[in-house]
Image: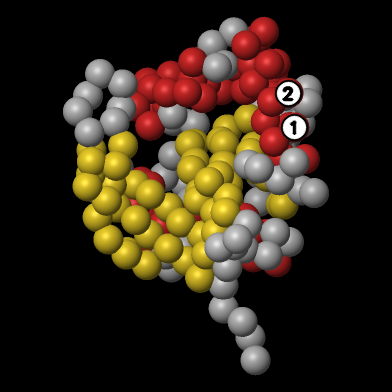
Amino acid sequence: MQLNLGAYYISPLHPKDGWSICNFTIANEDRLKRYFPKTLEQNLSPDLANIFVAKKVKQFIAKEEFLFTIKQTENHKIIGLVYIKEVDWTKKQGEFAYAIDYNIEGQGVMTKSIELLSDYAFETLYLKTLQIIVNKNNKGSLKVAENNNFTWIKTLPKAFTPPGEGPLNMELYELYHKIES
């Protein structure tokens, strides 16, 4: 599976993506340390990244969690990650988490990626509800949710604690699959 974004494309994490994930996380360490501390710490070396990739590929196959990469079409460099996580097959619900390279931010790549992956989640995974949980100060992530017609549902008090900080309130946004009649 590959979703085309012109100069970029989205694909499931590949078993050989270890080096590329390591490079992405190191280059974006300052961006990832607050909201993606576990992803960062698991990819600080190529060896760690290969272990991470093997685990995430197994989770993808087992339909426990889905990690996608956004890559440049020209050189296949990873410029973003998108998770569909916290999948609840009973409720048919999943949550997006995403990060983009600092050089690409603000170009609409993540907005388009979430649009395409929302379609994938609804049409291929048969999920009915997608969530984005974001801190109100993360303007870029808020914009992605809003640009994709996610609806603000409520504030989740003290829902996330970044490393070395106190707990943060987070905003819950949801998007529902519309059945066409």
Q: Which residue is mark 1?
A: 58
Residue depicted at x 44% and y 39%: 105
Q: Which mark is residue 104?
A: none
Kind of residue indicated by mark 1? Lys
Q: Nearer the viewer, residue 117 or 41?
A: 41
Q: Residue furthest bottom?
A: 181
| Residue 69 horizontal side relative to residue 103, left or right | right
Cα distance in 3D space between marks 1 and 2 = 6 Å
| Quarter assignment of residue 138 | top left
Residue depicted at x 49% and y 41%: 98
| Tag 1 near tag 2, CB within 8 Å | yes
Q: Is residue 122 visible?
A: yes
Residue 65 lies, in percent from the top left, at: 63, 41
Residue 120 lies, in percent from the top left, at: 68, 59
| Residue 85 horizontal side relative to residue 8, left or right | left
Kind of residue indicated by mark 2? Ala
Q: Identify whether 74 is placed above or below 175.
A: above
Q: Which residue is mark 2?
A: 54
| Residue 32 horizontal side relative to residue 119, left or right | left
Q: Residues within 10 Å of mark 1 (few under 14, many from 20)?
A: some
Q: Secondary structure at mark 2?
A: helix
Residue 142 lies, in percent from the top left, at: 34, 52
Residue depicted at x 51% and y 25%: 39
